[in-house]
């Protein structure tokens, strides 16, 4: 089962439901945020008793499961490979990555507000002023307004390695720009994921009909507890509509690999979900995100 946000094909009214066996069943509400107000046990009861209108999957368009006041945050340098690659790209600032990997306090940063999140099949962007750009496939935690992890999704923390590598203080520009954050097609509820610390994460980058890069990892390599990451995120903050916390990447293509326009980035976390996005460049190519705030039909055709 996945909790999904969707519109019926060609329609404008956003709905929320569950996706089971290629069918979407409506909850009778219009936002994921509303579900995030429920404590975990009530959310589960709601999901297990949903009886609304049904749609075949082919008759709906799935939207990213993030809305309202929800935000996407991300953790960094949570896997050894991420620490080592950051140290390689950043030369004289290498020690900051070394220190944060072993520090008690994790690195956490704001990745996106809800409206800026790209969904499955929609284009992600690389910056025109960045030479080296990578996808970062990550397990994302979905946390409700009460601070409970209620489910999981897939996040692509698309990043500029050259901008971050120049100076770590440029991290917000390397990480937070239009179409730099993609989230999978739905939320796999917590009660259906027996062990989130033993999930395969695979990444494939297709270019001109061939595989330009591929790799696989497992969340058992995550250096932090999930509750510890959520604990730090909530320590001095509140998320009245819930929050998505991406847990960091362990798949970083070695330098000087960079994403290119026309690439197709495929991420899969079996048991959680998948995310496929073509790559475009520049702000103009992602203007649809701004237009889609008022009209969901402005979202582009999906890959
Ligand atoms: O320190 C930079 C960010 C690292 C990151 O996003 C990751 O490890 O996934
Ligand atoms: Mg990341």
Image (spheres, helix red, strand yellow):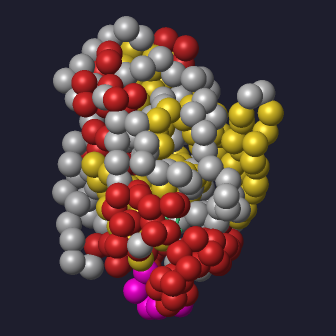
Residue ID at (40%, 57%): 175
Q: Position of residue 224 (x, y in %)?
A: 54, 79
Residue 50 seen by the camera = no
Q: Is residue 91 above or below residue 182?
A: below
* For residue 108, above or below residue 193: below
How many numbered marks have been drawn onto this rendered protein structure? 0
Location of residue 261 with respect to 174 vertically, above or below = above
Residue 79 image-quadrant placement: bottom right
Residue found 32% across the figure and 15% down from its top = 297
Return the x and y of residue 230 as percentages of the image width and height. Answer: 39, 72
State the image coordinates of residue 187 (x, y, percent, origin top left). Answer: 47, 45
Residue 142 or residue 137, whichever sits in front: 137
Any magenta on residue 237? no
Quadrant for the C terminus, please: top right
Q: Residue at image x 52%, y 61%?
A: 161
The region drawn magenta spans: 100-106
Residue 26 position, x and y percent, is 38, 25
Taking the image as shown, residue 137 lies to the left or right of residue 283, namely right
Using the rendered view, name the quadrant where residue 253 is placed.
Answer: bottom right
Residue 158 appears in view:
yes
122 relative to 163, above or below: above
Question: Residue farthest to the top?
Answer: 10
Quadrant of the drawing holding the N terminus: top right
Task: Name the residue at 28% across, 39% down.
Answer: 115
In the foreground, 280 or 108? 280
């Amino acid at each position: 089962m996945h909790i999904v946000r969707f519109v019926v094909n060609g329609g404008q009214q956003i709905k929320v439901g569950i996706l089971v066996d290629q069918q979407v069943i409506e909850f009778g509400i219009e936002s994921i945020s509303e579900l995030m107000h429920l404590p975990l046990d009530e959310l589960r009861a709601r999901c297990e008793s949903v009886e609304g209108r049904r749609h075949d999957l082919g008759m709906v368009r799935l939207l990213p499961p993030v809305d309202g006041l929800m935000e996407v945050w991300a953790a960094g340098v949570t896997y050894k490979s991420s620490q080592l690659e950051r140290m390689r790209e950043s030369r004289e600032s290498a020690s900051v990555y070394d220190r944060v990997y072993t520090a008690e306090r994790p690195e956490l940063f704001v990745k996106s507000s809800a409206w800026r999140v790209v969904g499955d099949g929609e284009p992600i962007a690389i910056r025109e002023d960045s030479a080296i750009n990578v996808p970062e496939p990550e397990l994302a935690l979905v946390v409700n307004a009460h601070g409970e992890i209620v489910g999981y999704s897939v996040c692509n923390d698309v990043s500029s390695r050259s901008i971050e590598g120049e100076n770590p203080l440029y991290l917000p520009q390397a990480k937070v720009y239009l179409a730099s954050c993609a989230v999978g097609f739905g939320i796999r509820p917590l009660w259906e994921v027996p062990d989130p610390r033993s999930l395969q994460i695979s990444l494939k980058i297709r270019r001109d009909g061939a595989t330009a890069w591929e790799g696989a990892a497992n969340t058992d390599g995550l250096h932090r507890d999930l509750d510890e990451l959520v604990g730090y995120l909530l320590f001095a903050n509140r998320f009245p509509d819930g929050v998505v916390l991406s847990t960091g990447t362990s798949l970083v293509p070695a330098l000087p690999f960079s994403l290119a326009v026309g690439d197709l980035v495929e991420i899969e976390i079996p048991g959680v979900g998948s995310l496929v996005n073509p790559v475009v460049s520049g702000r103009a190519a992602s203007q649809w995100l701004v237009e889609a705030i008022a009209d969901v039909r402005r979202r582009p055709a999906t890959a």
